[in-house]
Amino acid sequence: MNTIAVRGAITIENTPDETNAMIQAVGVLMQSLMDSNSIAIESIVSVQFSQTVDLRKMSAASALRIANPAFDSVPLFCSQEPEIEGSLPRTVRILIIWKGRGPAIPLYLNEASSLRPDLFEKT
């Protein structure tokens, strides 16, 4: 087995209930990445999140533990994105490292698809 890493991102809906929106979005992002890359939770080495400064109610790591309590035994880390003029707001980015086989398939959901236009077909 090799050590594989995959990136992804999702934007969080701008709603008064930011906490629930974060829990839902992070859960969807993680499950979608696990499904598209055939990642078993037992094979995950660690998960790193970053989130933009405008997301203040909860860390993405905490949101994942609420969305999926099976991640209680997985090392999770969350940091804040640098505040850069013109960057995409309300965004959570993820890096999953696991033991498995590639290739890794990245996933960028909602407005986060604009972060990697090279991955998406032009229409």
Image (cartoon, helix red, strand yellow):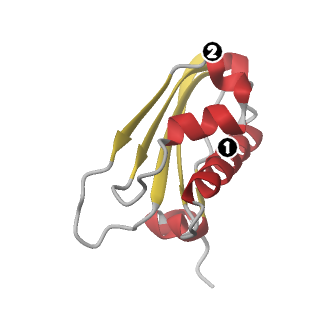
Q: Which residue, as the protein is rendered here, is positioned at the far bottom? A: 123
Image point 70% across, 50% down: which residue? 28
Image point 51% across, 42% down: which residue? 60
**Callout 2: few (<14), some (14-19), or many (20+) C-alpha neighbours within 10 Å?**
few
Q: Nearer the viewer, mark 2 or mark 1?
A: 2
* 112 or 92, nearer to the observer: 92
Q: Relative to residue 13, is residue 92 depicted above or below?
A: above
The spot of residue 49 in percent (x, y) is: 46, 39
The quarter of the picture where residue 80 lies is top left
**Callout 1: few (<14), some (14-19), or many (20+) C-alpha neighbours within 10 Å?**
many
The spot of residue 14 in percent (x, y) is: 54, 70
**Residue highlighted by disc 2:** 73
Which residue type does callout 1 highlight? Leu
Assign the C terminus to one quadrant of the image: bottom right
The spot of residue 97 in percent (x, y) is: 53, 27
**Residue highlighted by disc 1:** 33
Left or right: residue 6 versus residue 41 is left
**Whole-number angstrom distance, CA of label 2 to CA of label 1:** 19 Å
Assign the N terminus to one quadrant of the image: top right
* 63 or 33, nearer to the observer: 63
Q: Which residue, as the protein is rendered here, is positioned at the far front? A: 16
The spot of residue 19 in percent (x, y) is: 57, 52
